Image (cartoon, rainbow, N blue to C red):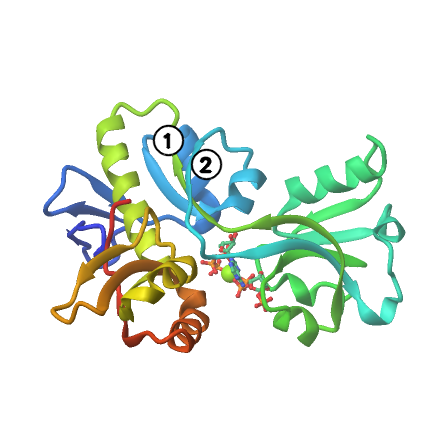
Amino acid sequence: MKEIGIKYRRGHRLDVALSTNMPLALVFLPASDIAKYVDKGNVDIGITGMDIVEESSADVNILAHLGFGKCQLCVQAPVSSKIKDVKDLSGKRIVTSFTNLAEKYFRDLEGGELTTKVSHVSGSVEAACALGLADGIVDLVETGETMRAAGLEIISLIMDTQTVLIGNKHTTHQDLIDILQTRIKGVITAGLYSSMEYNIPADKLAEACKITPGMTSPTVAHLSDENWLAVKVMIKKPEVNDIMDRLENIGATNIMVLEIQNCRM
Ligand SMILES: Nc1ncnc2c1ncn2[C@@H]1O[C@H](COP(=O)(O)OP(=O)(O)OP(=O)(O)O)[C@@H](O)[C@H]1O
Ligand SMILES: O=P(O)(O)OC[C@H]1O[C@H](OP(=O)(O)OP(=O)(O)O)[C@H](O)[C@@H]1O
Ligand SMILES: [Mg+2]
């Protein structure tokens, strides 16, 4: 909210906060209800997991994939059960917070008729097998730490998910949604890239541009020493060190990497 320039004041124990600088109100809802509100309620735009959009069958526009909250919805079973094939769980007891997705998955697996007993718990799903409530579970896996700690393993993948920006299909505030969508995308993109500047001998420019082609094309400026040029480009953050090594190897100097706070591409 801060990065996209929305200021707001949230009163103690209030879930609705009025923005002090834009014509909007922020609503803080439980993660699992957000998609439903954006679909059916008077909420124009929301941030939630794609898993929740699918679980609640929300009919919303997916405005952007935000690149965080990445995890996988998986069928899991106790390592000790020796279950290796998801078909071995068919007809058995599954516990999950994602009953709709789990039922759909097992119904498809069973060719249309659901014999697997899917029941709901709202959290700490991994405890269900050890406590005798389930033969397998359907839950999210990110690092796998929770799963391993509970003595479980992945039997099959239901879906990859990440945080998405969603929009109400019948909004009467499309102009404002467009502004917010553009601002959010700008901040997300800025987080994926760094700005890089370096000096390069003029005869090495072509080689350097192959290493750092930039988004459109590199900005090249002259130094007062005519044998040297200065280059400025955007590069993907995970590639920063590799690119610095390669540039240094061809003779680049004064290589500097700067954070980008915000951008519009
Ligand atoms: N370990 C994780 N890694 C990445 N994303 C996750 C992880 N756990 C949950 N998410 C994402 O966040 C969403 C909300 O998770 P969850 O319902 O557990 O919310 P919560 O805010 O932790 O609520 P609660 O306090 O009730 O557990 C999930 O549907 C999923 O999209
Ligand atoms: O693979 P990991 O990195 O261990 O993350 C996965 C865990 O994170 C989520 O739980 P959360 O912490 O939200 O607890 P809850 O489900 O009980 O709310 C999810 O339900 C898994 O239990
Ligand atoms: Mg949780």
Expressed as whole percent of the image width and height from the top left, the position of residue 255 reads 29, 74
Q: Residue at position x 57%, y 60% from top?
A: 123
Is 16 drawn above or below residue 76 in the view shown? above
Side of 146 relative to 92 (left or right): left
Judge left or right: residue 89 versus residue 203. Answer: right
Tag 2 residue: 36
Picture quadrant of residue 261: bottom left
Q: Across the whole image, how many numbered discs are drawn on residues?
A: 2
Residue 162 is situated, as x and y percent measured from the top left of the image, at 50, 51
Q: Which residue is mark 1?
A: 41
Check contact, mark 2 vs mark 1: CB within 8 A.
yes
Q: Amino acid at mark 1?
A: Gly
The yes-or-no answer for disc 1 within 8 Å of ligand 1 is no
230 or 109: nearer the eye? 230
Residue at 86 percent across and 60 percent down: it is 84
User: In terms of secondary structure, where does tag 2 sit?
Assistant: helix
Asked where in the image residue 72 lies, by quadrant, the reply is bottom right
Position of the C terminus by quadrant: top left
Give me the residue at 22% from left, 50% from top.
4
Report the residue at 21% width, 56% height from top: 2
Residue 9 falls left or right of residue 80: left
Q: Residues within 10 Å of mark 2 (few under 14, many from 20)?
A: many
Marks 2 and 1 sit apart, C-alpha to C-alpha, by 7 Å
Amino acid type at mark 2: Lys
Vertical arrangement, residue 1 with respect to residue 174, above or below: below
Crowd band around label 1 with a 10 angstrom C-alpha radius: few (<14), some (14–19), many (20+): few
